[in-house]
Image (cartoon, rainbow, N blue to C red):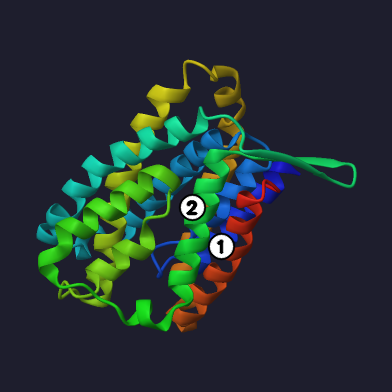
């Protein structure tokens, strides 16, 4: 059941979110969190996210605008380390509240409250017409990179901010998607180094248990991206955004309440 759920989530979300540039990590992470501690779930999702973005990089890297990548991704890489360090810090804090519902016991921890709150925030931004119409001027690309990188390192939620700042960078549709993929690869690589240094020593047995689920998730994400590039051309970006945002609201609320 663990492998089936992870594989299906990776397959469907990767295909649906190929053109939006975000959503895979946000939806896949809670599925991992059903079976592993939240920081490990975020790290496992980052592996799948990175591998899938490397696959997409191979499909469309030629369209990337490298000067824009440099302006956006260098600050993002720096602040991603701060976000990943913050995740480790929140995970070490004691539980905020414990409660029971029926025969089930639940625990609200700082790390779940923060990550759940961020997911809800980004979901509301995706549902907001004003935010959808918002596009920041190109001179703010480094600022956008810094913000996107920090939240990417902390929770994996980086795509919505990245899209808002890249929209006015004068990119074609293909260059927009490809540039976003390259930026995501850089942030994922940096945060994985941070996660690994913080977690491998203390949770090695659990990390070993992640190998097969991560492999299944990665393969299914590849298939989803490959099929999505060919089948989902007629699906509107707004439809994908709404679908992902609604799922994010449910996921974020569940995490914040300690249900996931």
11 up-or-down from 193: above or below: below
Rendered-image quadrant of the N terminus: top right
Q: Nearer the viewer, residue 207 or 254?
A: 254
Q: Residue at x 12, y 55 (%)?
A: 71
195 up-or-down from 157: above or below: above
Q: Residue at x 51, y 65 (%)?
A: 15
Q: Which mark is residue 248?
A: 1
The answer to which quarter of the image holds residue 140 is bottom left
Q: Position of residue 151 (x, y in %)?
A: 36, 50
Q: Which residue is mark 2?
A: 25
- Secondary structure of the residue carrying numbered label 2: helix
Of mark 1 and mark 2, the one earlier in the sequence is 2
Q: Nearer the viewer, residue 111 or 187?
A: 111
The answer to which quarter of the image holds residue 204 is top right
- Secondary structure of the residue carrying numbered label 1: helix
Q: Residue furthest front?
A: 97
Q: Position of residue 88 (x, y in %)?
A: 44, 31
51 up-or-down from 179: above or below: above
Residue 51 visible, this orientation: no
Q: Position of residue 191 (x, y in %)?
A: 35, 38
Q: Residue furthest top?
A: 201
Residue 8 visible, this orientation: yes
Q: Residue at x 40, y 43 (%)?
A: 154
**Gap between marks 1 and 2 measured at Cα:** 11 Å
Q: Nearer the viewer, residue 87 or 197?
A: 87
208 up-or-down from 102: above or below: above
Task: Give the foreground label among 1 and 2.
Answer: 1
Q: Residue at x 30, y 55 (%)?
A: 148
């Amino acid at each position: 059941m663990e492998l089936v759920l992870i594989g299906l989530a990776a397959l469907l979300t990767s295909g649906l979110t190929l053109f939006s540039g975000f959503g895979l990590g946000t939806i896949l992470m809670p599925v991992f969190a059903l079976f592993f501690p939240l920081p490990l779930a975020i790290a496992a999702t980052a592996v799948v996210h990175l591998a899938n973005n490397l696959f997409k990089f191979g499909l469309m890297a030629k369209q990337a605008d490298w000067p824009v990548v440099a302006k956006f991704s260098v600050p993002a890489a720096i602040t991603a380390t701060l976000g990943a360090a913050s995740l480790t810090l929140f995970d070490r804090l004691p539980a905020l509240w414990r409660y029971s519902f029926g025969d089930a016991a639940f625990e609200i921890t700082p790390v779940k409250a923060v990550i759940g709150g961020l997911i809800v925030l980004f979901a509301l931004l995706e549902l907001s017409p004003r935010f959808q119409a918002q596009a920041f001027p190109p001179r703010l690309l480094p600022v956008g990179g810094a913000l996107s990188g920090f939240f990417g390192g902390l929770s994996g939620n980086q795509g919505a901010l990245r899209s808002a700042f890249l929209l006015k960078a004068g990119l074609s549709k293909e260059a927009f998607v490809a540039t976003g993929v390259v930026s995501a690869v850089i942030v994922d690589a940096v945060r994985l180094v941070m996660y690994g240094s913080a977690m491998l020593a203390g949770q090695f047995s659990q990390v070993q248990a992640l190998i097969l689920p991560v492999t299944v998730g990665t393969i299914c994400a590849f298939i989803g991206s490959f099929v999505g590039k060919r089948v989902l051309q007629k699906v509107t970006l707004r439809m994908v955004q709404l679908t992902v945002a609604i799922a994010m609201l449910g996921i974020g609320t569940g995490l914040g309440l300690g249900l996931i």
